[in-house]
Image (spheres, rainbow, N blue to C red):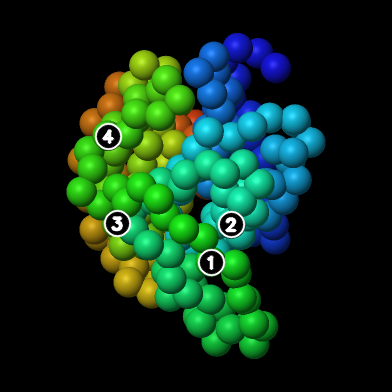
Amino acid sequence: MHVDSLLVHTGGFTATNGYLLCGPHGNIAIDAPEGAAAWVDGLGLQLDALLLTHAHFDHVIDAARLARAHRCPIYAWGPSTPASRLETHFKQWTGIDLALENYPVDQVLAAASEVRVAGRHFRLAHVPGHSPDSLVFIEEAAQRIFSGDTLMQGGIGRSDLPDGDGPLLVRGIRQKILSCPDPWAVYSGHGGPTTVGAERADNPFL
């Protein structure tokens, strides 16, 4: 494993991205899609923290497994609930029960502006509109942004989910993500990486 590595795992029927940041001071996971726990185990790594961009089910399916296996703290906007995980709505949409294992949120970030963990510093941006608890993790030293389901390559997050708000989402992206320098990389919850400049120039939703 390289001293400073960024790895990605894509899991589940929604093809959700989870990221792993490996460095000399420890390892951090960002989001926990299906299969993330087995993926980390297969790499033979120990996690020091799990950061969650938001609580929708496809991003947290393996959160409890990772926290239990690695005894690592979970950082998120607020406590996890069946409503924030969209479990009830999923059954209404599909007729399928989606009962996720609850996970503890050890570090509530609703009032925080930054996170320092495992030798890394993230500036936090609260960008609701896709979900009320959506957080964007901005690692200025590495010139990269982990945007969850707010901003994606050529798209933005859905706003037709419970508590969604399209204009609020677009306004937050413009103010809090597109205010970053054009060359900075954007790693989202779905799809491939992009840059701030590419989305500023070509994203049809912005």
Tell me which amino acid carries mark 2: Ala
Q: Tag 3 or tag 4, which sits nearer the N-term?
A: 4
Q: Quadrant of residue 200?
A: top left
**At numbered mark 3, what does the secondary structure look like: helix, strand or loop?**
loop
Residue 53 in picture, x, y percent from top left: 43, 48
Q: Which mark is residue 128?
A: 3
Give the label, 2 or 3, closer to the camera. 2
Tell me which amino acid carries mark 4: Glu
Q: In this view, does 132 lie above or below 47?
A: below
Q: Tag 1 or tag 2, which sits nearer the N-term?
A: 2
Tell me which amino acid carries mark 3: Pro
Q: Mark 1 points at which residue?
A: 102
Q: Name the residue under label 4.
A: 114
Q: Quadrant of residue 137?
A: top left
Task: Identify the residue shown where x is 64% and y is 54%.
Answer: 65
Give the label, 4 or 3, closer to the camera. 4
Task: Identify the residue shown where x is 25% and y is 60%.
Answer: 167
**At numbered mark 2, what does the secondary structure look like: helix, strand or loop?**
helix
Q: Mark 2 points at which residue?
A: 64
Q: Distance between the residues labelled 4 and 3?
A: 17 Å
Assess whether mark 1 and mark 2 are in contact (beta carbons under 8 angstroms).
yes
Q: In which quarter of the image is the N terminus?
A: top right
* Mark 3, other Cα within 10 Å: few <14 / some 14–19 / many ≥20: many
Tell me which amino acid carries mark 1: Asn
Residue 51 in picture, x, y percent from top left: 46, 43
Assess whether mark 1 and mark 3 are in contact (beta carbons under 8 angstroms).
no
Q: Is residue 171 above or below residue 80?
A: above
Please state which of residues 168 and 62 is positioned toward the viewer in this rendering.
Answer: 62
* Mark 1, other Cα within 10 Å: few <14 / some 14–19 / many ≥20: some
Residue pushed farthest front? 71
Give the label, 2 or 4, closer to the camera. 2
